[in-house]
Amino acid sequence: MKYKKSLLSRIFDVFNYTFLGLFACTAILPFLYVLACSFSSEKEILERPFYIIPRNVQLAAYKYIFSSPTLPRAFMISVFVTITGAATAMFLTLTLAYPLSKKYLLGRKVLLSLISFTLVFGGGMIPTFLVIKDLGMLNKFWALILPGAISTWNLLVVKNFFQELPQELEDSARVDGCSSLGTFIRIVLPLSMPVIATFTLFYAVGYWNDYRSSLLYITDNKKWPLQLVLRQIVLMAAGNIDGATFDAAYTQPPLEASKNAVIVFGTVPILVVYPFLQKHFVKGIMIGAIKG
């Protein structure tokens, strides 16, 4: 049976699509402008206020940023930190959330109270820095990975998701001789793929975009991740930093096209990964929003 929409429903749909289209433009158009600038000449960037198709496509900016090993090295460091950090964070989140989802766990309420306490109160920057220093993790990649290995909010959402899974499935697995670990690996994890994909993306984006941790804990510029290198390049372009602490190839402020190329270089990897997780991402967000 074909449903016929009323006039008000059609007007609402038009308004909805128009609003979402305009909202999407505010996110897409600036990135297209940055992308166009990265392939443009300096003269064109200064002459034209806004455009998404350059008159003369040039690769000079990308040749500039790849002329030094700094950016490729920082890129590989960011990839390593992102993959290792997201894997570590998901392992800790899943293995902690699953037992906390069981109401028969001894001391569950106390553990949940202590975990929820961290949503409101944190140690602060200086105590955290002193802990990292005393653990001997300064100038080591673990200083970028471990402090953000578990997000309390993500943990509670995943715990609620596990809590809503049918208990009968786990009981059936145990009747068939499956251990608790086997039930978790063979029954629970395959049913949790939307949540796993969603929060893996959340953690990965967080690690990829994080520059604060490397700013605090990494003083060796050979170990800087990509986001901190981008920050240095932008600050040098604005004349706000001493280039003596940076590689010789970047002691001079970069050109406008190069700055835009660097932004594209730092953004594209996440844009490439997102479509592969989008299917699970939407489903995982809905599950996390409804259940709990």
Image (tube, rainbow, N blue to C red):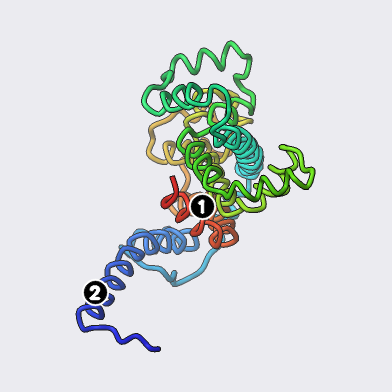
242 left or right, relative to 191: left
Query: For the residue marked with disc 2, what is the amino acid?
Result: Phe
Element carrying mark 2: helix
**Whether residue 131 is visible:** yes
Of mark 2 and mark 1, the one earlier in the sequence is 2
Q: Quadrant of residue 104?
A: top right
Name, please, the residue furthest toward the left.
8
Residue picked out by circle 1: 267
Query: For the residue marked with disc 1, what is the amino acid?
Result: Thr
Residue picked out by circle 2: 12
Element carrying mark 1: helix
Q: Quadrant of the N terminus?
A: bottom left
Q: CA distance from mark 2 to mark 1?
A: 34 Å
Please tell me how crowded label 2 is: few (under 14), some (14-19), or many (20+) other residues with Cα within 10 Å.
Answer: few
Name, please, the residue furthest toward the top.
134
| Rendered view: 129 above or below 238 | above
262 left or right, relative to 25: right
